[in-house]
Image (tube, rainbow, N blue to C red):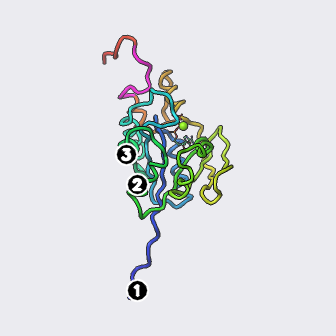
Amino acid sequence: MPGPPPSRRPRLGVMGGTFDPVHHGHLVAASEVAARFALDEVVFVPTGRPWQKSRGDIAPAEHRYLMTVIATASNPRFTVSRVDIDRGGFTYTIDTLRELRDLRPEADLFFITGADALAQILQWKDVAELWSLAHFVGVSRPGHALSDDGLPMDGVSLLEVPALSISSTDCRRRVADGLPVWYLVPDGVVQHISKHRLYAPAAVDGPAVP
Ligand code: ATP
Ligand code: MG
């Protein structure tokens, strides 16, 4: 008797980011790519030290990791990986993809990236190898032109996602200015930020007495 038909290879989305903090723009992008590309799972990968970001005041990796876990917990297809955090040092996407390919050799990888990051991709380390490790999906982002100029046509797809004009930089600034981030980031992330006093201006007289 013939056995069951061979099942197709799992399709694994990879959403890399600093996630400082994770916001609804990230979640909508991942959800839309998952639906349009029939992904079985999207793994969010918070960076260790992002090589592109010179600012030294990035929130500790464990907080960025925990906020990403909190934000994705309710979606059964979303998971979070510690590979970049645990590797230490600067994070390069090529290392992320090599490690995920070794961990999940049975899966096809789809790297999800916003229009701003896609525009920089030719400056990335070992760019030629990137296309062999994953299919790239560039998603629209308000304020950034979405274009695959200079990128290999069969290695990259472009996708228009619902426009959310949210950035982590703006969220951090809002917290520092005492403005709300409700509805820009998931409720649990608002609570994590406030509980751990992330992004607040340094207190002049030491920590406030509860
Ligand atoms: P920061 O302002 O600190 O750079 P960010 O909002 O750009 O933060 P990142 O962690 O740098 O967030 O981004 C991770 C990935 O998510 C990148 O590929 C980025 O282009 C994409 N992305 C971020 N915000 C959006 C958004 N609002 N819509 C679509 N894609 C987004
Ligand atoms: Mg960014």
Please, what is the dominant secondary structure of the magenta stretch? loop
The mark total stands at 3
Query: Ligand 1 sits in which quadrant?
Result: top right
Q: In the image, residue 31 lies at what x, y percent?
A: 51, 51
Q: Alpha-carbon neighbours of circle 3 within 10 Å: few (<14), some, or many (≥20)?
A: some
- The residue at the point 34 percent across, 14 percent down is 206
For the residue marked with disc 3, what is the amino acid? Arg
Magenta stretch contains residue 75: no
Q: In the image, residue 91 lies at what x, y percent?
A: 45, 41
Choose mark 2 or mark 3, whichever is in front.
Answer: 3
Q: Which residue is mark 2?
A: 76
For the residue marked with disc 1, what is the amino acid? Pro
Q: Alpha-carbon neighbours of circle 1 within 10 Å: few (<14), some, or many (≥20)?
A: few
Q: Are marks 2 and 3 in contact (CB under 8 Å)?
A: no
> In terms of sequence position, does the residue under pointer 3 or pointer 1 come before the other?
1
Question: Is 63 located above or below residue 38 in the figure?
Answer: above
- Secondary structure under tag 1 reads loop
- Secondary structure under tag 2 reads loop
Determine if the C-beta at disc 1 is less than 8 A from ligand 1: no
Q: What residue range appears in magenta? A: 194-203
Q: In the image, residue 127 lies at what x, y percent?
A: 56, 50
Choose mark 3 or mark 1, whichever is in front.
Answer: 3
Residue at far bottom of view: 1
Q: Which mark is residue 82?
A: 3
Question: Is 169 located above or below residue 48 in the figure?
Answer: above
Question: Is 152 located above or below residue 200 in the figure?
Answer: below
Q: Which residue is mark 1?
A: 2
Q: Alpha-carbon neighbours of circle 2 within 10 Å: few (<14), some, or many (≥20)?
A: few
> In terms of sequence position, does the residue under pointer 2 or pointer 1 come before the other?
1
Q: Nearer the viewer, residue 178 or 60?
A: 60
> In terms of sequence position, does the residue under pointer 2 or pointer 3 come before the other?
2
Q: Quadrant of the C terminus?
A: top left
